[in-house]
Amino acid sequence: MSSTRIHADERLEQWAEAGLRGASIAVADALSILTDESIPLLPLIHAAGRVRERHFGRDVLIHQLHNVQSGACPEDCGYCGQSQSSDAPIQAYRLHSREEILAEAQRARDNGAYRYCMVLSGRGPSDEEIDHMAGCIREVKDRFGLRTCLSAGLLDEAKARRLADAGLDRLNHNLNTSEQHYGEICTTHTFADRLNTLAAARAAGLDLCSGLIVGMGEGFEDLIDVAYRLREFEVPSIPVNFLVPIPGNRVREAALAGRPITPQLALRVLCLFRFVNPRAEVRIGAGREGHLRSMQALALHPANSLFVDGYLLTRGSNTRDTIAMIIDAGFEVRLDGAWPDELARFVAQLKGGGSAAFDIDHSGEVIRDDRKRVRNARLGAGAMGAELTIEGAAT
């Protein structure tokens, strides 16, 4: 074994030992995770996984996001299709009714979600919108027992306290990028405004959920700055989103430090956030399907949480595909109670390892047909018309 590899192994062991104690790594070490090619990826993931397992076991938390109000936002955030500076062809709608919000909460519960996350577009909520959301939060918790999270823009302590009194568990307010880079993505509010909202939520007794969007033209140092800012706030939940470029937005290409976000780089980013914030819930947010691609399961070693069924304006993996990935990778979905009946059957099939576990169509829905099926799958271009027949078992 070369001296370079021995040195890398020693560093990884030091980082893991620090994380096991709940301590953060040094800034120089954080930078080397992203830039030092002598640190091999798989041993890095393994070391981050040791830290994750110490603080969270093998559990994965599933979150479902619901955009309860879309568009008509006066802010000019360059990454967002709902902003006034975007020409993205989104569907705009007013604040959803109580019935619509409760129906989405029911769907989240049926999908095995641990937390139901609601998002309002706009600079910040009015008093009437706070009243409406407070009532919905109370009913979601009473009827479904779901933990709740709300993203509502800029808030003062008085409004945050009204939400806390209604039973809101967490307020989401992402930093998105570093203070130095913030003016490049938004000019209608400041990085300090975002820090003030986090402080107001903390003073009101709310848990914090705050993360970032990777790939908005920032440098590695910007990414590291956000990681340590969140560490200073002792944020318990950190969503790590990877930019999904939307036509019509001002920020149109996903790039980090002038380079594309490869699956390997995305995994290094997640490991960085685990080592800097070892006790925090690190969530794989938007863009995991497109940026991690076939390596999504490896991301469950540094991260212990993810979203299903989409990200406000973009589609994402459905619940069954995501649950299958989690279980196949040797992890467990964490629930407060029992699985809903339909998902319980699906999970039993997956864990049973029988042929029924493969009887899933392309969308992830269990095929409900008492007959055996023969499916013909073209082998692709250049296959000279050859067909592969697969006989599936009945469910």
Image (cartoon, grey):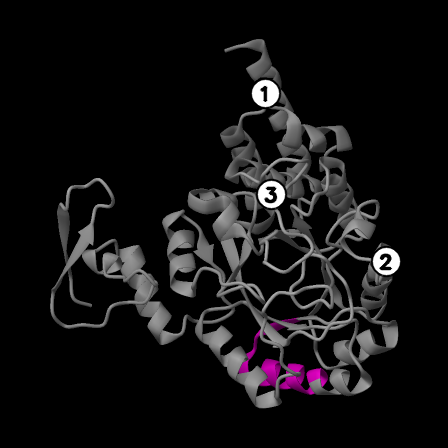
Residue nearer the viewer, 166 or 266? 266
Q: Position of residue 253 (x, y in %)?
A: 62, 47
Magenta region = 133-149
Q: Position of residue 347 (x, y in %)?
A: 34, 62
Figure quadrant of the C terminus: bottom left
User: Which quadrant of the view contains residue 320?
Assistant: bottom left
- Crowding at dot 3, Cα within 10 Å, few <14 / some 14-19 / many 20+, comes out as many
Front position among marks 3 and 2 = 2
| Residue kind at label 1, given as amino acid type | Ser
Residue sitting at x 61%, y 27%:
12
Q: Which residue is mark 3?
A: 270
| Residue kind at label 2, given as amino acid type | Thr
| Residue kind at label 3, given as amino acid type | Leu
Q: Is residue 184 left or right of residue 337?
A: right
Residue 134 among magenta residues: yes
Identify the secondary structure beneath mark 1: loop
Assess whether mark 2 and mark 3 are in contact (beta carbons under 8 angstroms).
Answer: no
Front position among marks 1 and 2 = 2
Total numbered badges shown on the rendered structure: 3
Q: Which residue is mark 1?
A: 38
Q: CA distance from mark 3 to mark 2?
A: 26 Å
Q: Is residue 124 left or right of residue 215?
A: right
Instruction: Residue 190: give its label.
Output: 2
- Please say if 390 is above or below 395: above
Residue 282 among magenta residues: no
